Image: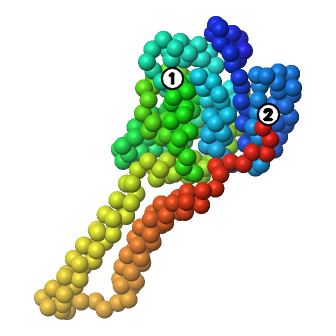
Amino acid sequence: MEKVVDKIKSLETEYWFIDDGSSDQTLSEIKKINVSNPNQVHYVTFSRNFGKEAALYAGLQAATGDYVVVMDVDLQDPPEYLVEMYETLSTTDYDCVGTRRTSRTGEAKLKSFLSDKFYDVINRISNTNIVNGARDYRMMTRQMVDAILSMTEYDRFSKGIFSWVGFKTRYLEYENVERVAGNTSWSMRKLFKYAFDGIMDFSQAPLSLAVWIGGASFILSLIGVVFVVIRHFVAPATSVFGWASLVSIILMIGGLQLLCLGIIGKYIGKIYLQVKNRPIYIVKEKK
C-alpha cells in the first residue's frame, strides 16, 4: 500500500481503520500500527457489530482529507489504482473515481446470477442508476463526501447513495480478485436482505406492486362472483356446493392481503427506525 501511495508526489496521507466489533485479533494489530505511527494511522472501534454500512459511514465521518478513499481490508481492492484515481480527480472535473468488477471469478454461479438480476431489477424500478459490479472502493472529493454525510438515514445502502448524490463519476474496470485469506461473511440470506433493503430504499415499486395485486385480486373476485351467479341461472345442474373451493379462494385472497400488508409494514418499519433517531453506530474507542 505504501509503495503505491509513495508514487503520488507531495501528498500527505492518513489511514482510518474501522473495527466493526471484530472478535479476532484485528483491533490489537491495528493498535500496534497506531503505536508505531500515531500521526498517520488512526482507528475507530464500535461497541458492537453495527454492520458494513455503519462502518463505511463512520470512516467517511472520521476522514479529514481533501480526497477520501474507501477500501476493504481483505485485499480484494487493488491499491495500484490509487495513482490513476488521484491523477483523474486532480486534473479533471470528476468528483469520484470508482471501480467495478467485469467478472465474478471465484464466486458461486448462483450467487453471480442473482447479483446480476438484482441490478437488472433495481435499475428498472428505481430512478437512481446503480452500476452493475460497482464496488465501494473509490476515491472522492471532499465536496462529494460532505454530500454523502448529509444523508443521515438509519438504513443505508451506500451503492445507491453514491449514485443518488449525482456527482460526476468515472469507473475503472478490473477482473475480480479473490481474497488472500479468510471467507466472506456475506451469506445468501444476508445478501437477499441487503438487496431487498436497497430496493426499498431507492424505489417505491414494492408499494405499487401491492396496489396492483390488491386491484387484480378485487377484479378477479368480481369476475368470479359474476360467473357463479350466471352459472346458477344458466346451468344450475352444474353448480357444485363444496367447501374446498371456497377455502382455497379464501386462502388465496388472504395470502395476497398478507403479502401487501407485509410490504407496507416493511416501509413503516423503516420509518419507525428513522424517527427514533438512534445513532447509526456507537464508538467505544477512537484514536
Frontmost of labels 2 and 1 is 2
Which residue has dot 2 on it?
287
**Identity of the residue drawn at 52% across and 14% down:** 90
In the image, taking residue 245 as reference, residue 109 lies left or right, namely right
On the image, the x and y values in percent for residue 18 come to 72, 36
Q: Element type at marker 1?
A: strand
Q: Which numbered marker is on residue 204? A: none
When the figure is inspected, residue 275 is found, relative to residue 245, above or below; the finding is above
264 over 146 or under it: above or below: below
Front residue of 37 and 114: 37
Q: Residue furthest left?
A: 234
Which mark sits nearer the N-terminus, 2 or 1?
Answer: 1
Please provide percent x and percent y for residue 57: 62, 40
Query: Total number of numbered labels?
Result: 2
Secondary structure found at label 2: loop
Residue lying at 40% horizontally and 70% vertically, measured from the top left: 256
**Vertical relation: 117 (above or below) 170:** below
Quarter location, residue 129: top left
Here the colouring is rainbow
Q: 218 or 97: nearer the eye?
A: 97
Q: Amino acid at mark 2?
A: Lys
Q: CA distance from mark 2 to mark 1?
A: 28 Å
Q: What crowding class fits label 2: few (fewer than 14 Cα within 10 Å), some (14-19), or many (20 or more)?
A: few
Q: The C terminus lies in which quarter of the figure?
A: top right
Q: Residues within 10 Å of mark 1 (few under 14, many from 20)?
A: many
Q: Amino acid at mark 1?
A: Val
Q: Residue at x 65, y 28 (%)?
A: 64
Residue 220 on image: x %, y %: 26, 73
The residue lying at 51 percent from left, 17 percent from top is: 89
Tell me if I can see residue 96 in this picture.
yes
Q: Badge 1 is on which residue?
A: 97
